[in-house]
Image (cartoon, coloured by chain):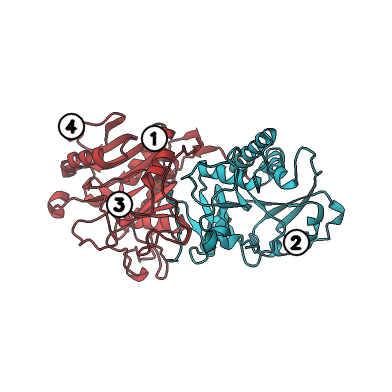
Chain colours: A cyan, B red
Amino acid sequence: RQDVLVLTPWLAPIVWEGTFNRDILNAQYVQKDLVTGLVAFAVEKYWFFIEGFMRSANKYFLAGHQVNFYLFTDNPGKIPHLQMAPENHVFVIPVQNDSRWQDISTSRMDIISTYTHSQFQYEVDYLYSMDIHVQLLAHIGVEIIDALVATISSWQVTPQHENKAYEAPPESQAASPEGQGDFYYTASFYGGSVSEVYKLTRACSQGLVEDREHGVEPRRSDESHLNQYLLHHKPTRLLSPEYYWDTEL
Amino acid sequence: AIAGRGKVHYLPYYLPCPEIFSMKLQYTEEKLIQLFPQLFYQQPRVLAPKRQDVLTVTPWLAPIVWEGTFDPEILDSAYKPLNLTIGVTAFAVGKYTRFVRRFLESAERHFMRGYRVNYYIFTDSPEAIPQARLQAGRSLVAVPIQKYSSWQEISMRRMEAINQHVAQVSHREVQYLFCLDIDMVFHNPWGPETLGDMVAAIHPGYFESPRSQLPYERRSSSAAFIPEGEGDFYYGGAVFGGLVRKVYEFTRNCHMTILADKANGIMAAWQEESHLNRHFLTHKPSKLLSPEYIWDDRKPKPPEIRLIRFSTVKKNYKEVRN
């Protein structure tokens, strides 16, 4: 690929189609006997997306490797029967819409960090979080596996939005001073090793709590905190916007 | 899942070389936490690659380090706070002691400036090692080793010697270790962009060659055999390195394949370099250094090589190998 940046200034690879050979990576992954988890939230009306998401993820997410799908939902009864590949497992985890939080998107970080600490770290080596209102259209494979992985927001490759930086109001914990910022990462798909994901979600969750205590609500708050964290804890691998395309653009 | 892998065990192997293989080592892996302090620099642009003339990422997503691909300030700000000590091994046996002074002087100017460095010079004549003036935080140790009868033997025994030394000494003193040839000189900065789990360098003589022309060992009776149709790059034996435990595993594996060849009465085409290439085919390096880091001054410099950082010293091979 000569048309895009494939390496960050801190030498983390940026994964685009054409930059990697999945066969080589699969061979390396299989040697290590790893398990990967995928977390998704289906709260309130979002239960509707479960079937489409799970069907496509079962087919395309780390196909051929062991994946634990962790589905957080406030409506376990509405989950349809899911036919999964033999190496994949689904765990349905009921959640309540916590009165502490304005909406579920801000409590996701808290929930992930809590469950990573109490459960996921014993069950998986790598953990990823993905928005549920998506369908995977092509293989997302072991090229995503690394210590701390973030996805470049599709905003950054859309010409009119190229200058988009951070939307957090300055008082927010997640405000970034002028002149900082590498890439804008989407909160819709990120992950890494369980220890790194724990640190990230915990830090973001704490930042959100502090924001709330000061009465500040930055727009797309969990994403602002994610970006602030990743500015100071640089990802070891970046996924191009191919890995999460926001069709609202 | 094998979550939280912590302990590294160094197990004994009982093969015809009792010295290293009866060594038992245990230490817990230390986790390096990377926190980046605030830095102001130009925003990287997603649609504007830095180098379009060369490959900067391998098909297994390991970075290939070229001038222009990295920002030394960002990397320094990440690595300096970790208080690392970087080890360097180099072998100065027989007449090769004459290269030590220039190697050290140039390393003091260009190699990992601002970091703690331990030079381990393996030699059969420690008294011939010059007392070089070193900067603060940098030290030199002459490691006595046996001189073997032929230069090929000396070259190949390096793997064993490095492995033994890691087990006995350097695993306690350094976090990263580079194994370099002594008959070379640093001309430009060599910094933390080179640090990685397992690092190999692309040989300057073959980076433009197709797979079929790479000088791998092609005899199937050798343990270093790489068949036609296989091979990623041709890596140079003059430069390799990484985390100390990775270098330990790597040198052990190479030494074992060298021993297997000895038992079968065969010596690989390019000695330990052939074994290194065999190993790196199945255990791919996590980072590659471009030929900027392992240059041969006899070659004319192509435009892709913007900077020569580490390169051979002109010498009469016949004379110095005796």
Seen at 58% across and 40% down, the residue is A170
Q: Quadrant of residue B217?
A: bottom left
Q: Which mark is residue B174?
A: 1
Vertical side of A186 occupied by B166: above or below: above
Tell me if residue A182 can be seen.
yes
Quarter of the image where the C terminus of chain A is located: bottom right
Residue A126: percent from left, percent from top: 62, 48
Q: Which residue is mark 2?
A: A84
C-alpha span from label 2 to label 1 = 47 Å
Residues behind callouts 1 and 3 on a single chain: yes
Q: Tag 2, which chain?
A: A
Vertical side of B26 occupied by A75: above or below: below
Amino acid under label 3? Tyr
Category of crowding for the residue at label 4, using alpha-carbon neighbours closer than 10 angstroms: few (below 14), some (14–19), many (at least 20): few
The single residue placed furthest to the right in the displayed view is A77
Q: Tag 4, which chain?
A: B
Residue B236: percent from left, percent from top: 31, 55
Tell which of B138 and A205 is nearer to you.
A205
Q: Which residue is mark 3?
A: B293
Q: Tag 1, which chain?
A: B
Residue B270: percent from left, percent from top: 29, 58
Q: Which mark is residue B127?
A: 4
C-alpha span from label 3 to label 2 = 49 Å
